Amino acid sequence: QVVNISREVSSPQGGLHGLFDPLSIESKKAATVVLMLNSPEEEVLATACDAIYKYASKGDENKVTLLGLGAVEPLFKLVSHEDPLVRRNATMVFGIMASNNDVRKLLRELDVTNSVIARLAPEEDIVVHEFASLCLAHMAVEYTSKVQIFEQGGLEPLIRLLSSPDPDVKKNSVECIYHLVQDFQSRAAVRELNAIPALLELLKSEYPVVQLLALKTFGVISSDRETRIILRENQGLDHLFKILETKEFNDLHVEALAVVANCLEDVDTMQLIQQTGGLKKLVSFAEMSTIPDIQKNAAKAITKAAYDPENRKILHEEEIEKCLVTLLGTDNDGAKAAASQAISAMCENLASKDAFGIQGIPQLVQLLSSENEEVKEAAAIALANLTTASPSNASAVAEAEGIEPLINVLSAKRDGTVANAATVLTNMTTQEPLRLSIQSHGVMNAIVEPLQSTNSLVQSKAALTVAALGCDADARTELRSASGLEPLVKLLHSKNDEVRRNACWAVMVCASDELTAVELCRLGALDILEEINLSTGRKNNFSEGALEKLLDNNLSQKYSQMGYLSSSNIITDGFYDYGQVNYFKYYLKVYAGPDFSLLQTKYWVYSPIMPPEYKGVIAGTRIWSLETPCSLLLSYAITKVIHFYMSYRYCLYLHRFVIIPLSISMIEMTDLIYKMGGPIERDKLHEFSWELHISEIEFELKCNVVPIGKIKKGTFYHRALLFKVIADRIGIGCSLVHGEYSRAWNEVKLVDDSPQGITGLLLPPQVYIVDLMYQPGCLMKQGSAEADHYQRI
């Protein structure tokens, strides 16, 4: 670069200062030219800036070289130089060099934005406007610079320059604005500074890049409802649809659709577009286009609009379902995923949900087998929404052979795919034929992996699926065999309320059989549920039910832990009385061997309110068993409650009677009482040495598990347990309550007689305690002094 310089020097005589004649200097080194940036002469400065501009324009490497030579700092000073030419050339260098990341970093440190913004003033040369706006456009990429430009008032002059006669100034200004409006403060400011009309004018530009940047800016700012209103008031939709209708502008269609998508979120805009025929054009445009991005963005526009219920009605009126189903069949994965998402949004409209059930479900089922994970997830979400509260759509999924692919995607890579596939399966289980079909495909083996997921949504949906399928015994067996109970129990520890709730639900359902209940207890479910139920913040509707169900199907554990078995808790073979809090050193075992037999004998039934013609009817049963070491020993009489239908005075009564053994059966009953020691006098209870007898049995058997049939001297809890066992075998409603130490008793509910003078009045049942020690067969009303004495030591 040749640089002409002149210097002012002293004459040899020391007189007046003179000037050199112009001196030409040719330099090929950038460092020399950078030094000239410190010259006091304006002409030198202007020429040096021009030379540096040309050098920097040749590539990014030259910009880095200039940065290393320290060119940025003197150039920063020259941007505000009083000479217009120097100022213009320095600004040109700044504009071109700001494209480099390292240069921008230094520019931020020097805080150049205020000086550059000043170059946007109306009095500045149009070239200065071009490169100052270019510099700001480059800098606005970083968040820090966005804030600086906004806070230092750069937005207003940039908006003014949108009307500049120079296309480059327009391009740079709108690009900078596009970067700035990524921040919500700038979006609001753009609206307040009335930038919408100027931006709309840019859509008419003959330069595609200007149109594109304007559309991208609209795509951002139209996310605000206030901006959409202004856009509608300024006929912005007309501009957008003109672009969409012009084939030559196909490179702008994608961005134009993005703006339309935002505008469709407003019901007023949707109605306006429908009234003007724009909606039909949009649907037709989406169906007919072969450009994947256009198809995808059209579907996204429908998705955004469908979030509003009124918009969904309008879209359904335009038969948008056909359009979306068509898009499901495109060759582009992005369009398929977007169409699936739109279907999910439209499912909130019941009419649309029914329409998709007929047209779209088979295609969505096919997409579950797609190699594209995004498509697979979008299809799963759509099917989940379609089958929620829609048995017909759930059946349609099965008819489309969707069960197997749904189970397959339970091992998909994306959590959303897994969670929604589980949801579809859960929705289908409400119909028994579908539930059995799902179970036959090995779903319980497949659900184990989702139960082990670290994603709370997947955990929740997987647990819910187990709860929906666990009502079938085969499903529980499969889950148990697949080691699925352990991860299910671990979910009870979850801090997520929904995960914990659904896990409790699943445990409650799975605890419906003894084998599963015992395994759940072994895995610690019982302790965890007790801990949950102690916390007001963690317990839920199912945690208490799960604990109760777990204990109901593990009665040995329930009785040991809670000391109570209700009339619905039926004792079966294998029951153990562990005792409470390890109080007992031995266990009682109940087992009815193969020699167990029922021998019927007669009881006389008596009730004071029974009609005379029914008195003395035989309606009772006595049960005996053979006396073997492991058999169930029946050792005393039972006070039995029966249902008796009778017709009296033309009315049908349901009444419960206590079977009162008469003296003829008392002898037989007494014989049985002596099988466990017989009646004990109250004041001689301490002399009844049942403990020694139990120890002798343990010694004989060399085991602390004592078959109840071996006991010849039984105290309260031995007799109460045996009474409960017998009552359960013959269908008598009877509860078993363990008191303190060796006390236990049975409770039955009986109906008292009608008050004197009132015939046929059925009173609520009362609770009675059955005496099995002092006067076997005697009933004591709960709360009475006699009952209290019986229950306490």
Image (cartoon, rainbow, N blue to C red):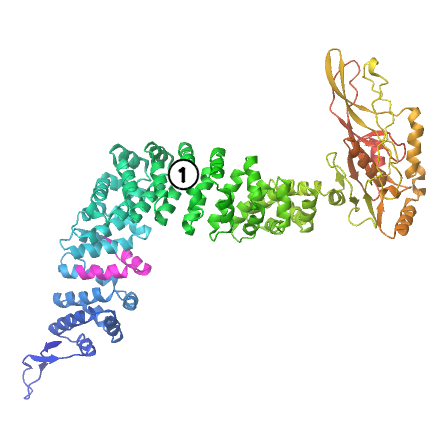
Q: Residue at x 88, y 37 (%)?
A: 626
Q: Which residues are magenta?
A: 130-155
> Mark 1 = which residue?
360
Image spot of residue 382 (x, y percent): 43, 42
Image spot of residue 273 (x, y percent): 27, 36
Look at label 1 and name its amino acid.
Gly
- Foreground: 612 or 403? 403
Q: Residue at x 50, y 48 (%)?
A: 408
Q: Is residue 377 above or below residue 788?
A: below
In the image: residue 731, left or right of residue 467: right
Quadrant in the picture for residue 572: top right
- What count of labels does the image hold? 1
- Foreground: 625 or 235? 625
Residue 731 on the magenta segment: no
Image spot of residue 467 (x, y percent): 59, 42
Name the dominant secondary structure of the magenta segment: helix
In the image: residue 540, left or right of residue 555: left
For disc 1, the neighbor class at 10 Å (few under 14, some 14 to 19, many from 20) is many
Quadrant in the picture for residue 128: bottom left
Can the viewer see residue 588?
yes
Name the residue furthest top: 649
Q: Residue at x 76, y 27 (%)?
A: 766
In the image: residue 584, left or right of residue 351: right
Residue 137 on the magenta segment: yes
Name the residue furthest bottom: 13
Quarter of the N terminus within the rendering: bottom left
Image spot of residue 604 (x, y percent): 87, 22
Can the viewer see residue 223?
no
Circle 1 sits in a helix, a strand or a loop, which is it? loop
In the image: residue 587, left or right of residue 541: right
Quarter of the C terminus within the rendering: top right
